[in-house]
Amino acid sequence: MPYSDDDLIEDIRGVAAEVGGKPTLNDYREHGTAAVTTIYDRFGSWQDALDAAGYEPREPDSAVTDEELLDELGRLVDELGERPTATDMNDHGAYWASTYRRAFGSWNNALEAAGIDSSPSQDRQPVSDDALLEELERVAEQVNGTPTTRAMEQHGEHSPNTYIRRFGSWNDAVTAAGFEPNEEVGTETVTTEELIDELHRLADEIGDRPVADDLRKHGKHALRTYQQRFGSWSAALEAAFDDESTEDA
């Protein structure tokens, strides 16, 4: 039986009660009932899901000091047990990675300011294109068909965003692996530039960076179109509003 929005919100609140505070995505993975992909499909991002559950959103950039940003980086290192990437911060941290870029000039500069080695660790060496494609083929066998971004999230070893950054789009990665892309309504007729332009138009209309609910109410394209094209709603926002693309390592 599918989860309702209320079911998911109550589940998030239950995890919060269990961990004693606003839960991280890792907390939900460990203690939640639904799949993380269900949360993303329904709300667009973990932060939007937390907002729907009544938890305070991330602080505005102007309210955050450099010291608070560095403290949060240190906390994230403790949580992950390794050097965090910009994607880790977007998924698990209290602030957007773009906030660090604006404050310190780049993600690596922020790491160095926090006393964290900015060089990729041994276990974070970039995976080869061949290895990415082999993993796509393995996931395809597991789901018995062309893999979707959701299938990669659920069964794969790598983030869909890694494929999008490496091959240009999820469908290009799928094609490179020898599969016919899964066409979702609207994704084949709208260009990436048009999707990004629409996000800028929406931001101008509401006076702030849009959240998934803004897109549902006022946008011209479906949330799933952005998730299919960019891999996730957060990745679409980064492509539209960050001056630099997110580093994968």
Image: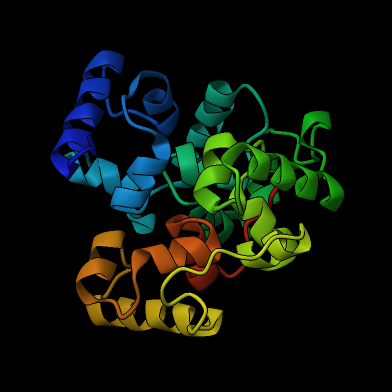
In-front residue for pair 81/125? 125
Q: Is residue 105 above or below residue 12?
A: below
- Closer to the camera in the image, 163 or 71: 163
Residue at the outermost front position: 144
Residue occupying image coordinates x 28% and y 44%: 49
Q: Which residue is more in the foreground, 2 or 243? A: 2
Residue 112 at what x, y percent from top left?
Answer: 70, 41
The residue drawn where x is 39% and y is 48% is 64
Residue 134 in the image: above or below residue 98: above
- Quarter the N terminus occupies: top left
Percent x, y of residue 36? 40, 36
Task: Kindly identify the residue that appears in the image at 46 percent across and 79 percent down.
Answer: 195
* Residue 245 on image: x %, y %: 63, 63
Q: How is the image coloured?
A: rainbow
Q: In this view, does 77 lie to the left or right of 32?
A: right
Q: Which quadrant of the structure image shows residue 111?
A: top right
**Image quarter in which the C terminus is found:** top right
